Image (spheres, grey):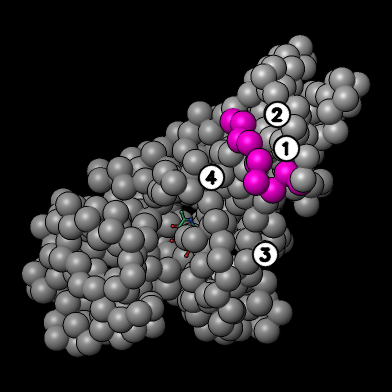
Amino acid sequence: MAVDPVNLSDIRAARRRIKSGVILTPCTASIPLSEITGSRVACKLDNFQRTGSFKERGARNALLMLSRARRSRGVVAASAGNHALGLAYHGKLLGIPVTVVMPEFAPLIKITTCQRLGASVILHGSDFTEARAEADRIAATGPAYIHGFDDPHIIAGQGTMGLEILEQVPDVDAILCPVGGGGLLAGICVGVKAVRPSVKVIAVESVCTGNLTAAMRAGRPVHVRRRATLADGLATLTVGDNAFALIRRRVDQVVRVEEKWISLAILRMLELEKTVVEGAAAAPLAALISGKLRGLKGKRVALVVCGGNIDPAILGRVIEKGLVHDGRLTRFTVTISDRPGGLAELARVIASCGASINQVSHDRAFSGPDVSETRVVCTVETRDRAHISMLHRALRRDGFRP
Ligand SMILES: Cc1ncc(COP(=O)(O)O)c(C=O)c1O
């Protein structure tokens, strides 16, 4: 049988190696999340790392494993995400030059953040395959290529999180971990199953990613189709060979969650846990609240909250959609009299229910032939779905038809 590319001693060694440069993030019990899920939930908050994700663990470990000669030649990676940020930050701390190749369409914020952290950013190609080819070309001239999820030193570094969870939550029954390329999951699987095999490790992916599900089915890593997802950190399109070899014999279960649950989980983390998480990091909570893991009711469950780098514009949309899902924001169209007092009458009914108008717009041109009437589109803040039903009843009672 082939020797595992990463074992427990590699992870323990990585832990000692990166200790001084990576934050020991809290893993706190959450009463509100326990209440809404029925499990006893703890959150491992790696979104509190300096660059906002767990990727620093592997990045620092891989950089520190380079020989003195290789350090001076620097490193190169193809990434527009958290791996690039982790490498750039720790490269700067350790005095190792970092070059990051991103596709030309990479968001400006990612480019400027990496540059601010001291990395040279090269924009090349229209997608990751082309950026990766350029990174390989650069690597052939001297710098070491550091793969974001399949390099054994990266996997060992990510595995340090699993050992921390076992110490911080000694009675943990299950760890829910997102999976993209599988570096994080592989590291956690290796560490946790070696130290405490009874702890369940459950992989979570989006229905729009599914790299591990596809690999499990095929018995080897395969490429999946690119689909838009809120969990962009998981959209690696495949799991790595090393990662898969480590995961396949250790992971207890793989679940896929719909995007609507990921979106809602981001909102719940914000409201109940007071913490900003990106889509990938919300996937474990999404799996719990979606009802896919009923067997975990009453169990002590650690959620791997692996990153907080979400675009504020997307966060804004997620919050609004979450409010709609919860019945705290609703929209309806009604016909009112287009004479003085018509709108006031509608506002009176809404106010009498204790709902608050957020936006009203008149739709005169498309309201039909009767010029004495107009349609209005109303967006209203409500308490919950029952409150919306009460509002609709009150509107109908007073002659409006929502
Ligand atoms: C926040 C976040 N979570 C999870 C992942 C997936 O990690 P892996 O590719 O090691 O499975 C990534 C990858 O970039 C990420 O940025």
For marks 1 and 4 on the same chain, the one whose residue lies earlier in the sequence: 4
For marks 3 and 1 on the same chain, the one whose residue lies earlier in the sequence: 3
- Residue 371: which numbered mark, if any? 1
Q: Mark 2 points at which residue?
A: 338
- Within 10 Å of disc 1 (Cα), the crowding (few <14, some 14-19, many 20+) is few
Q: What residue type is labelled 1?
A: Val
Nearest the eye: 196 or 189 = 189
Nearest the eye: 399 or 293 = 399
Marks 2,1: beta carbons within 8 A: yes
- Residue 207: which numbered mark, if any? 3
Gap between marks 3 and 4, in whole Å?
A: 20 Å
Q: Please identify, in this view, whether the residue under mark 2 or under mark 4 is nearer the observer.
A: 2
Q: Is residue 246 visible?
A: yes
For marks 2 and 1 on the same chain, the one whose residue lies earlier in the sequence: 2
Considering only vertical position in the picture, is 232 above or below 246? above
Span highlighted in magenta in the image: 359-368
Gap between marks 2 and 1, in whole Å?
A: 7 Å
Q: Residue at x 67, y 72 (%)?
A: 213
Q: Name the residue under label 4.
A: 317
Q: Which amino acid does label 3 sit on?
A: Val
Coordinates of residue 192 in the picture (x, y in percent): 56, 53
